[in-house]
Structure formats: C-alpha cells, structure tokens
C-alpha cells in the first residue's frame, strides 16, 4: 500500500509537470509570434526621411569687399602770388562756406602798381578825349573846305572871276583837310587802343590782388592748415602743386562721402548702377549704412583685374570720416521671387545637379538646374515645382526606390 501510494504520487507529479510545461509552451508561442508573420512594410519600421517644400525668396549675388571712405570733394589751396601772410582766419575742423576768406597775403608793392596803372588809365582816357575833339575839328574843317571849293568853282565858271591858280589852291586846301582828318582818325584809334591796354593792366593787377585772399571754393571743412601769420608764401608753379610743396590749406566736402571699393573681374558683368550696398565702417558701433552703387570706372585695373566702384553716402551728421576703412556688401543680380531650396538639399555628380524627392513613399532622384546661392539657399531654375517634396539633405539618404516614411523638416525662417 505504501509502495503503491508513493508510485502513484510520482506518476501524478510527472503528469502535472508535463502538462504545465505544455501549457507554458503554448502561452509562450501565443505571446511570441513567428518572425515570418511580421510585415517588413509596417510604417513604424520604415526609415524616416525629412522633407520640405521649395520656397520663393529673393536671392542675389553678394560680394564682400574692403573699401575706403573719402571726401566727396577735396582741394589743396595754393597761393597765386608771393608775399607774407597778414591774416589766417581758420583752423582745422572749421566749417566754411564757398567764397569765405581763409587767409590774406600782404603784397604792398602790388597796391602801388594798381595805383600807377589807374593813373595811366586816366591819362590815356584824357588823350582819347583830346583825339576825339581833334577828329571833330578835322571833320568840320573838311566840310568847310569842301563848301568853299564848291562856291569858288561856281564863281569861276564862265565868268573868269577866279584864276586857275586860285581854284587850284582851294582844291589843295580841301585835300589837306581830308588828310588831316585821316590823321585825326588814326590818332583817335591809337588813343582808344592805349585806353584798352591801360584798362587791361588795371584789371590784371586787380585780379592778382584778389589772389591775395585765399577763399574757399566750396562749402566744407578745413582738414589741414600748414601756415601761420607772418609766413612767407610763394606763388604756386607747375612744379609746386603737391601738398608738401606749398599748399596753404586742404578743404574737404564731407556732407556726402564717397565709398571706394574694387569689384573683381568675375563679378563685374553682374554690376549695375543702383545695386544695393551695405557699408560697415571700421570701429563704428552703430547700424550699417545703406547705399547704392553710384558709379564705376568702366575699366579694369590691368594689375589687379578689379574695377573701381563708388558708393555715395549722405553724411549730414558728419558721422563718417574720410580716410576710414569699411566693409562693403554689394547685392548684385538681384532676383526676387526665386524658387529655392537649402543648399544641402542639392547634390552634384557627373550627371549634373540633382535633388532627392519622394514618389509613392519611395526615394527617387530628380535632375535640376540651379542658379544663385544666397544665405544658405540655392536657386532652382528648372526641374522643380513648389509642390515637389524635396529631401532636406543629400547625405545619408537611403538607396533609390527604398520605401521610407517622409517627415516634414523644420526650416528657420
């Protein structure tokens, strides 16, 4: 009985164990389906690819270059006559108006020459007046002699009251009167010419005396002053017209500033008058100055292959100073409303430029033509529409025809 009981218990234990194992195996199989039953195209298991839509923005060809600031006008003022400076009325930094006297040169001998020339002119005018009176007298004498000759001829005709000798004398007197008239006319012309010469001499000396005043040719600021009262200044000559060779002042007009920059040969074909320009002067903490291309030289420097370009900037508050350096950003070949994508979305190989797009949730390649690149975006001129979803980057893209899960990429505005 005992033996049978133990055997029964063992048998029951084995049966229960086998049954439990079978139940656990069935539960495990139910909880873990066969891999062959998992769908490889289930969306959650597809590679995720960021896509975006092309955007229309304004693009331009931009050039960053160095520049220098210069006065709109600059003049070195020289002396036209030699003498001592009796008065210096301005200093550096002074604002002056056109025609304002900056300095005076003392030339006393020229004042004396002017007085002598004026006296000579008055003398010549008196001589001219005398010549005119003499001419009037000779004209009257000619008229008288002609009248007498006519009367004598009438008396002598057919009556014999006058001899031939008397008539000859009358005609001779008339001829002498005509000759005297010719001399009087010549004397009057000579006197008139002498008056003109004397008047020209007076005007010449007056002009030279005007040069004793150094005047401003335009409104501006005195940038340099190289003289003091009592200095002896020499009249400028063709070989003495440099600042170091005798200029008295340098005057600059700075209400408008010229910005000079050089445009490389490759960018010259795109340069136009009116192209926007941003000027950032060195050491200037304020906002950059916005201007436009005003003019360019229409020639390339044969040494640098650059073209000199100028930008005029209004400077009413005189914040900009001639001689300063600046950075200039030129915006050329501006194209508003251009269709663009990020530069990373465009690839290039032996077949040309391309982008990746999604067609029926699969990776496809699309050939495109590109234009300008600006601010991290590239212009697409052909092969793409605004509705075409473009893969945000050509790096790490799955092989063509791979099924993917598109996901909208976030773009910075």
Image (cartoon, rainbow, N blue to C red):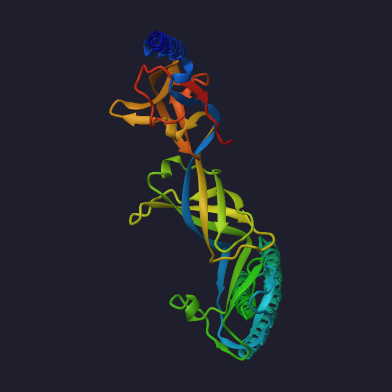
Report the residue that reaches farthest toward the front: 1
- Residue 164: image quadrant is bottom right
Image check: 20 left or right of 225?
left
Report the residue at 47% width, 78% height from top. 237
**Is residue 170 visible from the viewing direction of this image?**
no
Q: Quadrant of the N terminus?
A: top left
| Vertical order, 269 against 256 (above or below) | above
Image check: 355 left or right of 78?
left
**Image coordinates for residue 82, horizontal then vertical, percent:** 55, 85
| Vertical order, 107 against 404 (above or below) | below
**Is residue 331 visible from the viewing direction of this image?**
yes
Nearest to the observer: residue 226 or residue 194: 226
**Image coordinates for residue 314, horizontal then vertical, percent:** 64, 55
Image check: 401 left or right of 289?
left
Q: Quadrant of the C terminus?
A: top right
**Image coordinates for residue 57, horizontal then vertical, percent:** 55, 32
| Vertical order, 328 against 377 (above or below) | below
- Residue 371: image quadrant is top left
**Image coordinates for residue 310, horizontal then vertical, percent:** 52, 53
| Vertical order, 298 against 321 (above or below) | above
Nearest to the observer: residue 162 or residue 372: 372
Report the residue at 39% width, 10% height from top. 18
Nearest to the observer: residue 27 or residue 100: 27
Report the residue at 63% width, 54% height from top. 287
């Amino acid at each position: 009985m005992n033996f049978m009981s133990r055997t029964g218990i063992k048998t029951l234990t084995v049966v229960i164990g086998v049954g439990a194992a079978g139940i656990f195996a069935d539960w495990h199989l139910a909880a873990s389906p066969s891999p062959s039953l998992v769908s490889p195209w289930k969306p959650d298991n597809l590679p995720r690819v960021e896509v975006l839509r092309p955007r229309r923005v304004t693009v331009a060809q931009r050039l960053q270059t160095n520049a220098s600031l210069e006065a709109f006008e600059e003049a070195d003022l020289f002396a036209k006559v030699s003498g001592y400076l009796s008065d210096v009325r301005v200093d550096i930094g002074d604002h002056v108006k056109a025609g304002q006297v900056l300095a005076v040169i003392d030339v006393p001998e020229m004042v004396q020459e002017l007085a002598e020339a004026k006296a000579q002119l008055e003398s010549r005018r008196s001589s001219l007046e005398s010549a005119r009176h003499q001419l009037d007298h000779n004209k009257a004498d000619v008229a008288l002699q002609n009248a007498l000759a006519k009367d004598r001829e009438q008396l002598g005709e057919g009556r014999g009251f006058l001899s031939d000798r008397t008539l000859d004398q009358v005609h001779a007197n008339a001829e002498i009167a005509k000759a005297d008239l010719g001399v009087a006319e010549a004397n009057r012309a000579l006197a008139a010419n002498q008056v003109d010469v004397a008047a020209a001499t007076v005007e010449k000396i007056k002009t030279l005396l005007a040069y004793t005043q150094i005047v401003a040719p335009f409104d501006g600021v005195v940038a340099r002053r190289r003289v003091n009262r009592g200095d002896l200044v020499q009249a400028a000559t063709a070989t003495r017209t440099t600042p170091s060779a005798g200029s008295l002042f340098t005057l600059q007009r700075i209400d408008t500033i010229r910005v000079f920059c050089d445009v490389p040969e490759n960018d010259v074909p795109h340069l136009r008058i009116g192209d926007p320009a941003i000027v950032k002067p060195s050491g200037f903490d304020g906002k950059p100055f916005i201007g436009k291309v005003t003019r360019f030289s229409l020639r390339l420097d044969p040494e640098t292959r650059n073209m000199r370009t100028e930008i005029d900037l209004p400077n009413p508050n005189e914040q900009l100073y001639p001689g300063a350096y600046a950075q200039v950003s030129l915006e050329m070949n501006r194209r508003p409303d251009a269709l663009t994508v990020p530069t990373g979305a465009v690839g290039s190989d032996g077949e040309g430029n391309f982008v990746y797009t999604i067609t029926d949730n699969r990776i496809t390649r699309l050939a495109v033509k590109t234009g300008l690149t600006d601010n991290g975006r590239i212009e697409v001129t052909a092969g793409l529409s605004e509705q075409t979803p473009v893969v945000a980057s050509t790096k790490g893209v799955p092989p063509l025809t791979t099924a993917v899960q598109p996901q909208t990429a976030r773009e910075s505005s």
